[in-house]
Amino acid sequence: MRILLASSEVHPYSKTGGLADATSALGKALAKAGHQVGIVTPLYRGIRDKTPGLRRVDWHFDLPIGEKRVDAELWTVEPMKGLTIYFIHKPEYFDRAGIYNEGGKDYWDNGERFIFFSKCVTHLVRYLPWKPEVVHVSDWQTGLVPLMIHHQTRTEGWGNAPRVCMTIHNLAYQGFFPGSTYALTNLPLDYFHGEGTERYGWLNCLKAGIAFADVVTTVSPRYAREITTEQFGEGLDGLLRKCEGQGRLIGILNGVDYEEWNTKNNSWLKAPYSVRSLRGKAINKSELQREVGLPAQPDVPLYGTITRLTDQKGMDIELGALEEMLSTDMQFALLGSGSQEHERAFERLARQHPGKVSVRLGYDHGLSHRIEAGCDFYLMPSRFEPCGLNQMYSLRYGTIPIVRRTGGLDDSVSDVTDNPQTPNGIKFSTYSTLALSKAIRKSLAIYSDKKLLRHYQLNGIKADFSWDRAIKKYVECYQG
Ligand code: ADP
């Protein structure tokens, strides 16, 4: 098939979270399976310098944004056969220090930036010479694309318009902007109502995507069920129940790009390892301890977390449980950035437990691989988790995930109650410090029994979340 993916983040060009990994891996897997694939994304600062082969093409966008016209260039690169990345080059919008925010503050014109991006995507879908049969958009940043395509098909006689698939990677981010921002779409007011793109008088970009896409997917089967409830629906559960009733809502667990996330051939790691021998893992552990300033103690269990520091990720119960558990012999390494409140709390924890807690604030791709490889256990106690990737990376790295039973965490990790023969992680249900502490105690018991520890590790390494399974399901969605 001919498929155009659109995303505000694509690894390795830009990334703040799982959206970047998922888009890139899906694009590669589809191309490998023989489909013709394009991915359209903004040209952010720094991409030009680190992307050999990137070139400007003869294409010019000149699109209305409210009362003005805005132009942009198109740049492309072909990282592999069958896959073209299309970059929208508009320095006024995208050549900035951050992707969505700077210094903890969202850019004031995010509405305008991503309305423009959505218009560029729609324009490409319509006029690309290879005529995509499917356009697959993700999250609020491209949420208006399904509506724009719907509108142009209805009013401008766009024959053979593509099928539109929309993936929700996180319902908590909906792209809310003051109602006046809607004028920048240049769409008639017919769509600015409760059944369309409006909520409480505000523009809601994600809602437009859900309402107008042919098929809506989310990144795990359990999250697909959860978001139809008031508890997880973020105010859109009614619309999502309707979508489910129409057979338009489907949960597909993300895969893992094992070319990137593997322990056998990985330049980010000191020593390779695999199911056949975990000796390299011990070397990575002592290297990590050295790198993050913890004593190199092979027999002390090392826990890790790599995350955006937000309430979603369960940082309050993680801090509470660590405070309780750090009196035992254990170490903890954090890599994360996000809210100042959480950053300060973890820095305080590190000061209170020197030699036991290491906190790195910031974003560091290489270190994220080394934490995955060097730790014994990975903590991911999310309040909710659409899919989550780090627990799946942990499994492949022989690092036992300790996760809350929600969303994709529940779908990807098996504990002894799910799977008595081949458990690969530890799960808990109640969102509390107590429940997480109890799970950490279970992990200490596993750690003290080397045979059991290895059993869990090997079960994890053997678990297979390659994209092949997921793309079959996406192709079904694309075919309708
Ligand atoms: P989310 O998309 O909600 O942030 P996921 O688990 O789906 O969570 O994906 C997070 C991705 O971002 C993972 O690849 C993770 O390693 C990466 N990541 C998060 N924070 C950092 C950081 N501070 N440094 C490096 N990588 C990070």
Image (cartoon, rainbow, N blue to C red):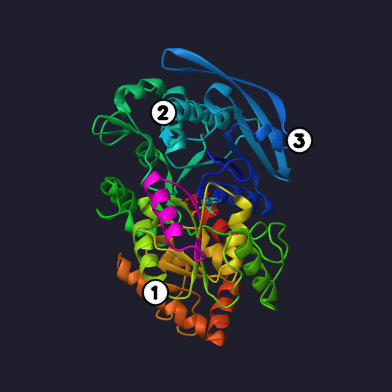
Q: Which mark is residue 225?
A: none
Q: Is residue 254 magenta?
A: no
Please rate how many residues cluster around mark 2, counting C-alpha atoms within 10 Å: few if below 14, some from 14 to 19, many from 20: many
Q: Looking at the image, can residue 186 be seen?
A: no
Along the viewing direction, whichever of 390 and 338 lies nearer the viewer? 338
Tell me the residue at 51%/34% (across/down). 161
Q: Which residue is mark 3?
A: 53
Real-space Cα distance between discs 3 and 1? 49 Å
Q: Secondary structure at mark 2?
A: helix
Q: Looking at the image, can residue 121 be seen?
A: yes
**What count of labels does the image hold?**
3
Q: Which residue is mark 1?
A: 439
Q: Is residue 474 left or right of residue 108?
A: right
User: Which numbered disc, 3 or 1, marks the residue that appears first in the sequence?
Assistant: 3
User: Which numbered disc, 2 or 3, marks the residue that appears first in the sequence?
Assistant: 3
Q: Which residue is mark 2?
A: 111
Q: Is residue 40 left or right of residue 65?
A: right
Hey, what amino acid is under mark 3? Gly
* Residue 211, above or below 454: above
Q: Are marks 2 and 1 in contact (CB under 8 Å)?
A: no
Q: Position of residue 357 (x, y in %)?
A: 49, 62
Q: Quadrant of residue 44?
A: top right
Residues shaded magenta: 332-357
Q: Secondary structure at mark 1?
A: helix
